[in-house]
Amino acid sequence: MYNNHFYIDSVHNHLHAALFRPVDCQSVQHGSDVCFHDFREHRHFCEERAEEDPEGNPTLLNQMFTEIYIIKGGTSEVNDEHEVRQIETASRTPDRPETTIRHEHIFKTPPGRDEPIRTVMTKGVAGIGKTVLTQKFTLDWAEDKANQDIQFAFPFTFRELNVLKERKYSLVELVDYFFSETKEAGICRFEEFPVVFIFDGLDELDVLLTNLIRGNLLPSARLWITTRPAAANQIPPGCVDMVTEVRGFTDPQKEEYFRKRFRDEEQASRINSYIKTSRSLHIMCHIPVFCWMTATVLEDVLKTREGGELPKTLTEMYIHFLVVQTKVKNIKYDGGAETDPHWSPESRKMIESLGKLAFEQLQKGNLIFYESDLTECGIDITAASVYSGVFTQIFKEERGLYQDKVFSFVHLSVQEFLAALHVHLTFTNSGVNLLSEKQTTSTCFYQCAVDKALQSPNGHLDLFLRFLLGLSLQTNQNLLRGLLTQTGSSSETYQETVDYFKKKISENLSAERSINLFHCLNELNDRSLVEEIQRVPEFRKSLHR
């Protein structure tokens, strides 16, 4: 549901058709005549596809939108912990009451404040719903539902702006470049109008945006900036009037989402009950994009395996997701049948290439890639559009200015899963451990991965480790039969890995480290150690808060 790519394909390619549709031109004296546009007349342009079902059929934003939990307050300080760890923290009961706010009220002046709200910064981890909130804000405004005092709304993404970072533009030139209708209308200044600029996905700031944020440029304009926690410190706290944080779905909102997605009440009830049985899945479903992935998988499983078992671990869920997307590719694009094998030589090569890209870019800390990165991983640039079109939900392509292409995976967790799959494939096929770049035994392979994850200062390999361990199970490898040419790991290796966990647990790790080891054991389907881990007092306290 809540992925930037499938929620609304491109803010500028679709929304601006509605926002700048000329309806009535009238001369207004402001030192020069300007042509007014009624931005709200053509609101149907805004209602682009919100998400796709497993067959790739679109639904509309207003039909699928589920309110997201947003709180007021917080800090603009940097948080560079792994984002799944932040989700786990946010999913616990807060120590003190939190003040919530709805997306349409973010510029509403709170009681006791004299000055209007000019700049709002909204934080949230990847996939939590920040982009969707900005798009719903714009759609509600275009449909006369909220914020009717705003005359112009200009939504930008930092990804698109960064394509222009080597060029110098004035504010008017920048607006004209993205929204040519303003230039055609002869609008050359915005001081006279109530304007809101939306900047989604803070990455890096240039001089123009810095001056806009500091109020040196167009101080009357309202600004809404969304950012991941790790980038929040780029904006001085004194320049922000209000900080909000998107926490994703509450438990009732999760249930509402699945009820909207699965119109059959009995089916929706079964899925909501199922989510609660797995702590890992329940926590991850705070992330709206993970709810969508889960719904995609479960819809396919329930349809193709009547009464069959539902995935119980994250690794199993992501394997099913990969298989579903491969089936869509085979049926929708290759003209195959539902009963055809999932894995052709072409689809195997595609996943192997994407896995290599995922791992190499994860090691560099990159979530956004360019054509040169794809070339280095053996991905044919001329076929790049097929990669993103076929695997729309796994790998997306955003077209910036000058037809430049920027690539990313649909969510960080998908990148981490494919990276783990690449490391697993490389080891099983050649015996080479990419984490140490040398040949090693199976036991050393998994112990090395555990050590690497524990050494990561901010938990950046936590989820990668869960997936890598999950892929060691024969049951999960069976699900990937056809992609994996070799399967299986010895019971001796399994037991030695479990024993290594016991050893690490006894080393008095932090609560966060212990929690991740607990999740790793869940991925290994080892329930015997749960009680032993829960004897760690600090861990037990954190787990049940």
Image (cartoon, rainbow, N blue to C red):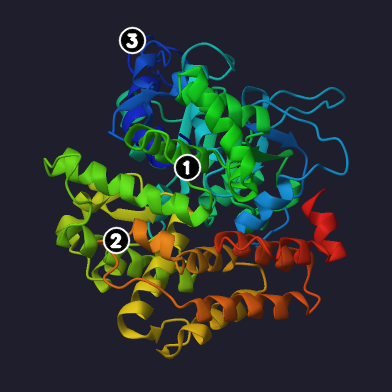
Image x and y of residue 339, in percent: 19, 42
C-alpha gap between disc 2 and disc 3: 58 Å
Is 218 left, or right, of 9 in this rendering?
Answer: right
Q: Earlier in the sequence, mark 2 or mark 3?
A: 3
Q: Is residue 9 above or below residue 88?
A: above
Question: Which label was assigned to residue 481?
Answer: 2
Is 210 left, or right, of 97 in this rendering?
Answer: left
Is 455 left, or right, of 380 in this rendering?
Answer: right
Specify the amino acid type for callout 1. Leu
Specify the amino acid type for callout 2. Arg
* Nearer to us in this view, 371 or 224: 371
The secondary element bearing badge 2 is classed as loop
| Residue located at (54% from left, 29% from top) | 270
C-alpha gap between disc 1 and disc 2: 18 Å
Q: Quadrant of residue 116?
A: top right
Count of numbered circles in the view: 3
Mark 2 surroundings: few (<14), some (14-19) or many (≥20) residues within 10 A: few
Image x and y of residue 292, in percent: 46, 37
C-alpha gap between disc 1 and disc 3: 52 Å
In which quadrant is the N terminus drawn? Answer: top left
The secondary element bearing badge 3 is classed as loop
Mark 3 surroundings: few (<14), some (14-19) or many (≥20) residues within 10 A: some
Image x and y of residue 222, in percent: 61, 32
| Residue located at (62% from left, 23% from top) | 104
Q: Quadrant of residue 72?
A: top right
Residue denoted by label 1 = 310
Residue denoted by label 3 = 23
Q: Are marks 1 and 3 in contact (CB under 8 Å)?
A: no
Specify the amino acid type for callout 3. Val
| Residue located at (31% from left, 63% from top) | 354
